[in-house]
């Protein structure tokens, strides 16, 4: 069977799903973005006399997700007018759009049962040629397709993009034992030549490659940070480009990913690798887990809620980024930037090897 992708359906209008819909439109694909139907009216909807049956209410969640993508920085769309090409709907009224889809890309919450239930519904309506993939960041892909039809499982795999998908190069491709080789080959080719990604084939192991490394090092870092009293500003001054990592460093990256996503990934990974005692030490860090869970409970989820480890504050008409005090959980205005002799010296070196050698041979706080 020859495959092509002209019509795609993205399910899940959160930060990642809406950004994926945007990037598919950027690549010239017709896209429908779906999400769940709200169960309660907002105060504004009540004041307007709307009911839960009104289309604008039923599509509120997906519409809000698309609006966030329109305003995202860096921009998710090549041009603002491309956002008008994304069709929106919900999973109760519009699931039949999958009957015309070439690719269904799932990007919902990191919860195995929710994903499995969704796949069962997709299985009932997908056409024979339709490829279905999950953007899970670490749940075993085989488990998500458990109980599905043979045709579904043959056309199912993991396609793990990294946020923001327009800009980050990596795309992990995770087939199962049932995935047809031609499906893997086609999606890999499409990802590389149409979406501009660097393809890394992965085995269906917990958190695959990127997140297994990234979350493992992140869990260790958060444990160490809290045990040794570092501040948010200090950590991000040390763990950015000067050690070969992005400008988002540690805490800006967590805000970008979403602190709720971070918690889900940590819980799933800890359950999936009980035999790895070294990893468990940091995945089960009481201080770190308490901090993350408290932020999630408060709704301080990072960029998508306007505050996490950083909070954007307008003062005298200008934007300021206040940092979270990790002990008091209060936000503090920006002060003097942290200074470390080793960081200053390392910035003057040309190669990453030379920069890291500076840190290895220094004994300051960095």
Image (tube, helix red, strand yellow):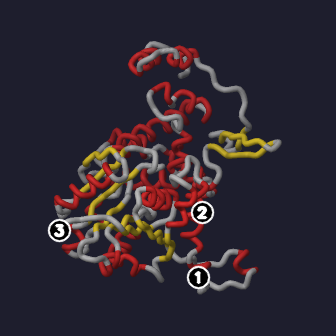
Residue found at x 59% / y 19%: 340
Asked if residue 35 is positioned above or below residue 230 in the image, the reply reads below
Quarter of image, res 83 = bottom right
Mark whose residue sits in front, 1 or 3: 3
The x and y percentages for residue 337 are 66, 26
Residue found at x 48% / y 35%: 246
The x and y percentages for residue 105 are 37, 64
Residue found at x 57% / y 57%: 80
Which residue lies under the disc numbered 2?
Answer: 67
Residue found at x 53% / y 38%: 248
For marks 3 and 2, the one nearer the N-term is 3
Quarter of image, res 60 = bottom right
Pick the residue in front: 83 or 324. 83
Tag shown at residue 55: 1
Which residue lies under the disc numbered 3?
Answer: 1
Find numbered disc 1 in the image and state the secondary structure of the residue it sits on. helix
For marks 2 and 1, the one nearer the N-term is 1
């Amino acid at each position: 069977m020859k495959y092509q992708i002209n019509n795609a359906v993205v399910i899940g209008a959160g930060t990642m799903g809406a950004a994926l819909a945007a990037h598919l439109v950027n690549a010239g694909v017709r896209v429908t973005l779906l999400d769940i139907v709200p169960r309660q009216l907002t105060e504004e909807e009540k004041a307007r006399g709307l009911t839960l049956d009104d289309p604008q209410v039923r599509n509120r969640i997906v519409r809000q997700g698309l609006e966030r993508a329109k305003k995202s920085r860096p921009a998710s769309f090549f041009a603002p007018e491309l956002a008008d090409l994304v069709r929106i709907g919900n999973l109760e009224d519009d699931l039949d759009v999958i009957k015309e889809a070439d690719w269904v890309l799932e990007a919902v919450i990191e919860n195995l049962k929710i994903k499995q239930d969704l796949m069962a519904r997709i299985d009932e309506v997908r056409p024979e040629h339709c490829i279905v993939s999950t953007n899970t960041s670490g749940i075993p892909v085989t488990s998500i397709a458990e109980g599905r039809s043979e045709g579904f499982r043959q056309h199912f795999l993991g396609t793990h993009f990294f946020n923001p998908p327009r800009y980050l190069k990596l795309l992990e491709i995770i087939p199962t034992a049932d995935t047809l080789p031609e499906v893997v080959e086609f999606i890999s080719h499409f990802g590389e030549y149409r979406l501009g990604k660097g393809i890394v084939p992965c085995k269906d192991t917990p958190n695959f490659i990127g997140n297994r490394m990234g979350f493992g090092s992140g869990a260790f870092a958060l444990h160490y940070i809290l045990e040794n009293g570092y501040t948010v500003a200090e950590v991000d001054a040390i763990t950015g480009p000067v050690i070969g990592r992005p400008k988002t460093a540690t805490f800006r990256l967590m805000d970008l990913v979403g602190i709720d996503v971070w918690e889900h990934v940590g819980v799933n990974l800890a359950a999936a690798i009980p035999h790895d005692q070294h990893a468990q030490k940091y995945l089960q860090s009481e201080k770190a887990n308490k901090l993350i869970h408290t932020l999630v409970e408060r709704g301080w989820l990072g960029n998508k809620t306007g505050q996490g480890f950083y909070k954007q504050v307008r003062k005298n008409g200008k934007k300021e980024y206040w940092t979270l005090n990790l002990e008091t959980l209060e936000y503090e205005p920006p002060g003097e930037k942290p200074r470390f002799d080793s960081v200053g010296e390392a910035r003057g070196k040309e190669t990453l090897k030379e920069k890291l050698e500076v840190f290895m041979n220094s004994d300051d706080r960095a």
